[in-house]
Amino acid sequence: MTEPVIRRSFFKTMLAGVAGLGSVLATTKAQAATPKQKVAYHLADAEKVAFVLGNIRNHIEGVGGAQNVEIALVVHGPALKAFHEMSANEKIKEAVAGLHKDGLALNACGNTMRAQTVDLKDLLPGFIKADQGGVVRLCELQQQGYLYLRP
């Protein structure tokens, strides 16, 4: 009597293992088929700087890492002052450095830079200048397939 019980138990264990393996393979295949996200974050409000940087960090972690997403941050208006090298607080500097290391593309509005009389050397490392303006840069990114987010 113990032999049929052992066989049934072994069969159930094998069936569960095969089902589990199938589930893992299906999940892996679905992840491989999912295209890399491309997202443009728009930041103009000075009071939202830390919030938006936190959103970007959560976004990267939420998709399983920087290898699964391309993110561009476009900054203009009052928010750009938070990224001035001389006046940026340490938390902002650390967040920007870490996100840039993870591939965040930092875009500064050329119009805002002129209005604030700053050059790229005056901003935190990693910024590029959107010569035609931040809103034009956002449109260019959308034309390249980036999704637009303004938290």
Image (spheres, helix red, strand yellow):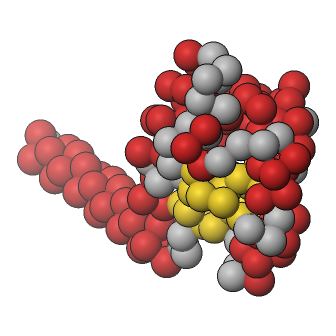
Q: Is residue 22 visible?
A: no
Q: Is residue 40 visible?
A: yes
Seen in the image, is 90 located left or right of residue 88? left
Seen in the image, is 68 located left or right of residue 62? left
Query: Of 37 and 124, which appears nearest the observer?
Result: 124
Residue placed furthest toward the front: 117
Vertical position of residue 33 compared to residue 59: above or below: below
Q: Position of residue 9 (x, y in %)?
A: 23, 46
Which residue is pictured at 80% across the width and 71% down the height? 132
Which residue is pictured at 86% across the width and 30% down the height? 46
Which residue is pictured at 61% across the width and 66% down the height? 37
Q: Position of residue 51 (x, y in %)?
A: 76, 29
Query: Of 8 and 127, which appears nearest the observer?
Result: 127
Give the quarter of the image for residue 84: top right
Seen in the image, is 50 located left or right of residue 35? right
Which residue is pictured at 73% across the width and 29% down the height? 82
Seen in the image, is 56 located left or right of residue 143? left
Give the quarter of the image for residue 133: bottom right
Vertical position of residue 117 compared to residue 54: above or below: below
Q: Position of residue 142 (x, y in %)?
A: 78, 75
Vertical position of residue 147 compared to residue 92: above or below: below
Query: Of 58 and 23, which appears nearest the observer?
Result: 58
Residue placed furthest toward the left: 3
Q: Position of residue 97 (x, y in %)?
A: 48, 35
Q: Quadrant of the N terminus?
A: top left
